[in-house]
Image: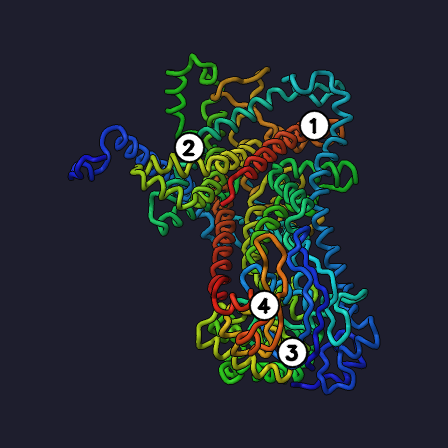
Amino acid sequence: MADESSPAVETTDETSTLASPTSPRSPLEAAVSSPLQLDHVGHAGDNSFRGAAYAAAFVVVALVAFVGVFLAVIAWPSLSRNTVPFLTSTVWNVSGTEMAFGIAGLLWTTVLSSVVAMILAVPIAVGTALLVTHYVPPKLGSIIGFVIDLLAAVPSIIFGLWGLKVLGPALGPLYDWLQRTLGWIPLFSKGVDSTGNVLTASVVLAIMILPIVSAMSRDVFRQTPPDHIEAALALGATKWEMIRTAVIPYGRSGVIAASMLGLGRALGETVAVMIILSQTNTPGINVSLFSGGETFASKIANNAAEFDSPAKTGAYIAAGLVLFLVTFAVNAIARLVADRRPRS
Amino acid sequence: MSAPTTMSSLTAPRGSRRVTDVVVRGLVYLSGVIAVVPLVWILITIISKGLPVILSAAWWTQDLAGTTDRRAGGGALHAIIGTLEIGLITAVVAVPIAVLGAIFLIEYARGTRLARGVSFMVDILSGIPSIVAALFVFAFLITILHFDRSAIAAALSLVLLMLPTVLRSTEEMLKLVPDSLREAAYALGIPKWRTILTVVIPTAFSGIATGVVLGLARVMGETAPLLILVAYARNLYLSPTSDTMATLPTMINTGRDVAETLAGYDRVWGAALTLILLVMGLNLLARWIARAGRLKDR
Amino acid sequence: MAKRIDVENLDVYYGSFKAVSGVSLVVEPRTVTAFIGPSGCGKSTVLRTLNRMHEVIPGAYATGKVALDGVDLYGAGVDPVAVRRLVGMVFQRPNPFPSMSIYDNVASGLKLNGVRDKSTLDESVESSLRGANLWNEVKDRLNKAGTSLSGGQQQRLCIARAIAVKPEVILMDEPCSALDPISTLAIEDLIQQLKELYTVVIVTHNMQQASRVSDRTAFFNLEAQGLPGQLVEIDDTETIFSNPTKKATEDYITGRFG
């Protein structure tokens, strides 16, 4: 045993606990004579590190609170000067001295585009999740999973560019056909714009949320307890019957949570929607999927250059606040649903 | 039940059960094909339109000073540097908070009500739309504190987006560090904070680094905060306090309405391809780090 | 450097659950004491109270007295971190730090306690690895990852790591349960050597192992699931295995339960 004890005893209590028995004062003897011996172990380090960790956690909580509070503080003066009902009006006129702004139109377009995106994306996402977890061999499954995950890495501006220049024009004939055959339904009535419409935005949003919903669904399907699967198969179930009786019930709340998260993403997506949707000047709500329009996020981003006076900025921030509250609610629901998931 | 086993009773189920099974199988495979199409389509589009542009040396060494949308030439250096710089500032601010936050959740408050509350807030933060994060920074820094728009302001709003991503992935990695290693360190009389810094973090390092790189890839592709918090410029600006700084996403956004016949239109696709290469490159780097970490552990 | 341990009237709780009740025993210096008993009888819990490792589990606490040569480890002003420097521990599964080399694993305790001097570290690493009968096997690859060793070697590495900080006592919590028979034999030989310098307390499921390595044996039992574990008796190993005082001990030794 190396003997570094003799100098160590004189230096610090910390190293003296390492002393060997040949030392004049073994640690315990030292402990007996000075009860502080066992007490001194660099607690400054422990305390400051714990403090830093708590501070970081506080920052996270404070940020969420601040986002809501600051947006509300800035939005309030403008809201109090508003001459029309904020929640139900569709006008947006904030340039003059008489401010009039309402979010009904924004809310409609935001919710419509996101819900349609979810309707398009969830079945495909669930399908691919089943494909990867229960149909193809694991190796091929992980490759397909990787390709879909890569989709999540594509920046939204690129989805927007591609949607505007490539996908929209390519879907034009389909849009014409839909308007001709289903035009009697208001949702499919003849719109203003040929390709820069809500449906193109929805399709792009669907592609953007597909990897999120798919990845989470994959995780829950993979966790299906093997005995549930074997029990179903032992009863003579076909693959689909096994999935319906074992996999789907087990993963249902996970898929719902994933869909809500996807919805949250779609509601708040900014740039892709901003690029694709043509702004319309028609008053009121554009009911049709084939018209243009603006979502909360695209409205704000389109008018970033106008944030020159606090009053104007406040109007847009009021819209942002509503978007924050809506996404907060959707994400909170997702979290609550996910927490109710059975644990294996 | 007492019927004798015959060949026919051992063949596949018939009738509607079999039809349903086959139809579902078809739909499942179809959904797989549909899911893969967009990525391939996007990549083909962008590579075919953008590749000729980025193959010139000028693309990587020059900015757009002095060129117009009508003239060919110039490059994306200003936007590449801007994207990297803003990404770097974001990471420098976000990563320490994220890692410490994850340490709080796993090492200090695991299983407590406080941890569940903070964890819930992390989920909420990760769901905040980028435009709202941008508005928050605008409201706070510019409307209330009267700062100007700047690259730093843009980076700070990106911090709100990167923080929860990195925190979550770090948390997952810390969870994977076996308690037996912490116990081994405690049994040596190593204080908790040194255990975390010298045993827990190094063990989880490759996983944490993977999360950081993925978070970086995400924020480098973000556009909305940049639209609001820092103006696009055709020249190279380096100062983080400058109120104008180009980035690849805003370069694409600025040029998206240029007519297809002009040189500026091609540059938009060049910028898109450059951005994709950057982001995909970071994603592959993240995968590589994760794999290298796993190999080392064996 | 070996010290005597006195446990008096020890109760251990996990939250409101009382896991161990009323344990009193003495461990003499430079002996090997084995804790045996059925699962859930609290033997590992008692072992962990000897260096306050049970406190790592949230809500766990102990009442009573554990003294090292007369110094109460639970006395006011005593820091559990300091206690663990005096009372080292080896765990059920080998747990070398995966991010560190063999050398760094052994040196980790010293380094993290503030020793920086290279020659001191070199000396300590060599003597500790020799002390753990591992030096000859690893001296040419000290920079390789600790996890690159076999299971038995990893466990001896963990023992080297524990003795490098020169503890007074070494606690072993089923140190061979994850090892093959040959590695187990190597560890048992090592335990015999360790007791010349240290006080060793070992928890084991394996009664042959207890009879092979220990001088004293403590038998723990619990009357029923949900009730706290208790110390039934402690005596010389030979006595426990040949002529135990209590019926429960005899039943356990002869394999009638547990």
Q: Nearer the viewer, residue C15 or B44?
A: C15
Q: Nearer the viewer, residue B212 or B222?
A: B212
Above or below A46: residue B50: above
Tag on residue A123? 2
Q: Chain of mark 4?
A: C
Q: Depth-wise, is mark 1 or mark 3 nearer the camera?
A: 3
Q: Are marks 3 and 2 on the same chain?
A: no
Dividing the picture into quarters, in which one does residue A223 lie? Answer: top left
Q: CA distance from mark 2 to mark 1?
A: 34 Å
Q: Of callouts 2 and 1, which one flags the residue occurring earlier in the amino acid sequence?
A: 2
Residue that appears at 47% across and 52% down: B56
Q: Which residue is mark 4?
A: C246
Q: Chain of mark 1?
A: A
Q: Nearer the viewer, residue A102 or A62?
A: A62
Q: Chain of mark 2?
A: A
Secondary structure of the residue carrying tag 2 is helix
Q: How is the image coloured?
A: rainbow
Q: Is the Cβ of the residue at disc 1 closer than 8 Å to that at disc 3? A: no
Image coords of residue A341 (percent x, y):
52, 39
Amino acid identity at mark 2? Pro
Q: CA distance from mark 1 to mark 4?
A: 79 Å
Residue that appears at 68% across and 44% down: B113
Q: Which residue is mark 3?
A: C199
Amino acid identity at mark 3? Thr
Image coords of residue B215 (percent x, y):
57, 49
The answer to whether residue A146 is left or right of residue C63 is: left
Secondary structure of the residue carrying tag 4 is loop
The answer to whether residue A272 is left or right of residue C70 is: left
